[in-house]
Image (tube, helix red, strand yellow):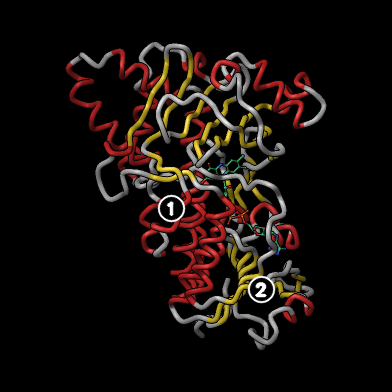
Amino acid sequence: MNRRHPERIKTVAILGGGPAASTLATLLARAGLTVAIWHQPKHAPLIVGESLVPAIVPLLQKLGIEEEVRAFSTFKPGATFNLSDDVNFSFFFHQLTGATATYAYNVPRDRFDETLLTNAQRAGARVIEARAAVERVAGTDRVQLTRETLAKANGFLADSPDLLVDATGRARLLPNLLAIPSREGGRKDTALFAHVDRAQLDHTGHVHTTRLDHGWSWRIPLPGRVSLGMVIGAEHLPQFGATKEARYDNLLKQDSVLSAVASDAQRLTPVMEYVNYQLVSARMVGDGWALLGDTAGFIDPVFSSGLFLGMQGAWLLAEAIRDGSPAAFQRYQHEATHHLETWHEIVDYFYSGRLFTCFKVGQKLRNTLLVRLAFPHINKHLGRIFSGAASTAPYSVGLLRFAMKYGLKDEDPGALRIR
Ligand SMILES: Cc1cc2nc3c(=O)[nH]c(=O)nc-3n(C[C@H](O)[C@H](O)[C@H](O)COP(=O)(O)OP(=O)(O)OC[C@H]3O[C@@H](n4cnc5c(N)ncnc54)[C@H](O)[C@@H]3O)c2cc1C
């Protein structure tokens, strides 16, 4: 664990310049630490992860950037799920009660990431526009910046920093270098994603999650365009063409659901492809280092929890760094792992069909006394889980588990399973 304790951690090098890195840098710089971010700008034409959950809004407020984000984003008042011809649910965040925002945003990710990074700079963090490289200190669990990487700081960090934080997203510099094992999720999906000029929406601003002939799709309304992604088992893709562009364009025309909601959609961007993204690192802290954001773990795009987990993880890690003790770092690892595992369970209920079968049963029986009494209470807690506000609250998660176990009556969840 962090061998620097009981000395305070004073200098931190953060690798990556995504939302998790920038959030952590802001918090640490505000607390008076010396912080440098090595930022290799993304060259991809699009950055994935554009739909926020309401629980991010209080984080944006604490960072002091909500107004700026609002100015370039689409207001998101809710989420709509289209599971079959007759099973459709829309959730309106204004119904959420408790300590969270009752709205969220859909964000163009280039602007969002830039806003967070500039905010970190404003707080006093130094941004070094260069690719970071690390090497192992032979025979130990320690890592250090290579001499060339440290030199890029031009003396801002006189010596090796007290702590290295890997927030390089899926590049996962440290886990790859240290051969840290990770637990992979059961889904082996491929996500294809692009921006299109238009798509049908049931509700303005809602993120739409739609079950397809195979897999599911997202529609995220953004200013002047719609982000449209498809998440599909790799085995189904070859029938739609040889390239990712051909597969995307053919799926738009040939999938019976997509062709109904996006038949006249014109693609505005190249197609991006993501595979094997479900993984949780078995270790997140070590001797002089810690992992953050997607590098520590990522579950699944459904329910838009990625940015929330990464930014909330930055808060947890900042607390551990300010404390500096091995116990504090262990606490960070425990909590971050627990959050990821809980979301994994929630996501599984979606893929197995149990989640929306339970909602369907609730709707069917809504006139019975028991459901009339219990449904608002259950709904309130489920809403708070999916908004991120209570995604690890024992009572809310316990209620979800109870509903998943006993709330299906005689309905077969397989009918709403993601194929
Ligand atoms: C298909 C899909 C759909 C998703 N949809 C959503 C969604 O709707 N909502 C949501 O909240 N989340 C979503 N996510 C998750 C979200 O994209 C991530 O959780 C989020 O971007 C993680 O932020 P991060 O800061 O950890 O990493 P990243 O955003 O990946 O940032 C890492 C940064 O590190 C930089 N970097 C890499 N290597 C180096 C290096 N050697 N030196 C310096 N810099 C380096 C990269 O260029 C990048 O800028 C989705 C993910 C996938 C795969």
User: Distance between the Cα atoms at labels 2 and 1?
Assistant: 27 Å
**Residue 327 visible in the snapshot:** no
Q: Nearer the viewer, residue 200 or 6?
A: 200
- Asked if residue 329 is positioned above or below residue 86 in the image, the reply reads below
SS type, badge 2: strand
Q: Are marks 2 and 1 in contact (CB under 8 Å)?
A: no
> Callout 1: 10 Å neighbours few (<14), some, many (20+)?
few
> Callout 2: 10 Å neighbours few (<14), some, many (20+)?
many
Q: Position of residue 88 (x, y in %)?
A: 41, 19
| Left or right: where 45 falls relative to 6 | right
The residue under label 2 is 128
Q: Amino acid at mark 2?
A: Ile
Which of the two discs, 2 and 1, sits closer to the camera? 1
Quadrant of the image containing the N terminus: bottom right
Quadrant of the image containing the C terminus: top right
Q: Amino acid at mark 1?
A: Ala
Q: Nearer the viewer, residue 314 or 78?
A: 78
SS type, badge 1: helix
Residue 71: assigned label: 1
Tell me the residue at 46%/36% (across/down): 346
| Left or right: where 200 falls relative to 382 | right
Tell me the residue at 71%/61% (across/down): 173
Q: Residue 142: which quarter of the image?
A: bottom right
**Residue 250 visible in the snapshot:** yes
Q: Position of residue 287 (x, y in %)?
A: 63, 72
Tell me the residue at 74%/26% (across/down): 247
Tell me the residue at 55%/29% (across/down): 198
Q: Position of residue 108 (x, y in %)?
A: 54, 48
| Left or right: where 33 falls relative to 213 | left
Residue 298: assigned label: none
Q: Nearer the viewer, residue 329 or 77?
A: 77
